[in-house]
Structures are given as structure tokens and as C-alpha cells.
Image (tube, rainbow, N blue to C red):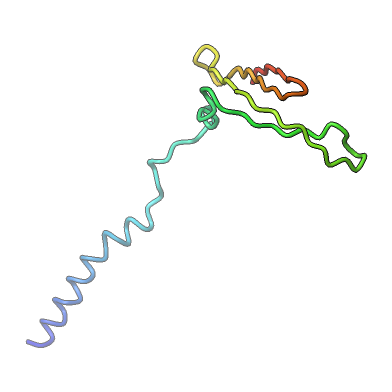
Amino acid sequence: MRKRAWLCGVLAGAVTLSPILTLAQAPSTSTTARDGAHDFDFLIGDWKAHVRRLPDRLKGSTAWVDYDGISNHRKILDSNANFEEFEVDSPQSACTSRARR
């Protein structure tokens, strides 16, 4: 009788562990290949921008110029590309740029 109880316990353990072992060994088929097309979609929209510029580089200068403004990112024709308009200014000057990516 004791052998039968031990055998039932071993079989119950084997049946319980078999699905776990099967899942651990099975290759994942649910992952799809990523092409990176939407990796930078978080940039789309209007962003507050703060830029610090060192006008006299490589001369030991520590006088930085601070700029504040806005950066606008828009998708182009529902594709991977986007267009950025960057406009910042300071009391001394202003900086404007546009980029297509």
C-alpha cells in the first residue's frame, strides 16, 4: 500500500511538472521581428526646449548662453519620417532650425 501511495505521488508530480517543462523548452513563436519604424514616435508633439551654448569653445571660456523655446515634431504622411521645427531664444540672440528625419 505504501508503494502505491509513493508511486501515485511521483506520477502526480510528473504530471504537474510536465506542462512547466514543456513551456520552458518551447521556443517563443509570439514575438515578431521589430523593424524600429516607431521607436521615436514618443517625440511627436510640442516640447519645451532648454539649450545651453558655449560661444567661445576651446578657449577656456565658462560663459554659457541659455536659450528657452519650443520644439515641434510632426509625422510626415503617416510614414517613418518626421519634421522638426526648433525655435529658441535668449536675451542675446535666437536660434531656429528645421530638420527632416
Indicate the position of residue 63 as horizontal and vertical percent values. Answer: 82, 38
Q: Residue at x 40, y 47 (%)?
A: 28
* Residue 17 appears left or right of 49: left
Q: In front here: 42 or 12?
A: 42
User: Hey, which residue is sitting farthest top in the picture?
Assistant: 77
Residue furthest to the bottom? 2
- Seen from this angle, which residue lies furthest left? 1
Q: Position of residue 73 (x, y in %)?
A: 56, 21
Q: Position of residue 47 (x, y in %)?
A: 55, 26
Q: Residue at x 63, y 17 (%)?
A: 85
Dividing the picture into quarters, in which one does residue 10 lie?
bottom left
Q: Quadrant of the C terminus?
A: top right
Q: How many marks?
A: 0
Viewer-nearest residue: 41 or 45 = 45
- Residue at position x 67%, y 18% in the image: 99
Front-most of residues 38 and 97: 97
Image quarter hosting the N terminus: bottom left
Q: Is residue 92 left or right of residue 60?
A: left
Residue 83 lies left or right of residue 10; in this view the side is right
x, y percent for residue 98: 68, 16
Residue drawn at point x = 76 percent, y = 32 percent? 65
Q: Is residue 54 above or below residue 88?
A: below
Q: For the view shown, which residue lies furthest in the right direction?
A: 59
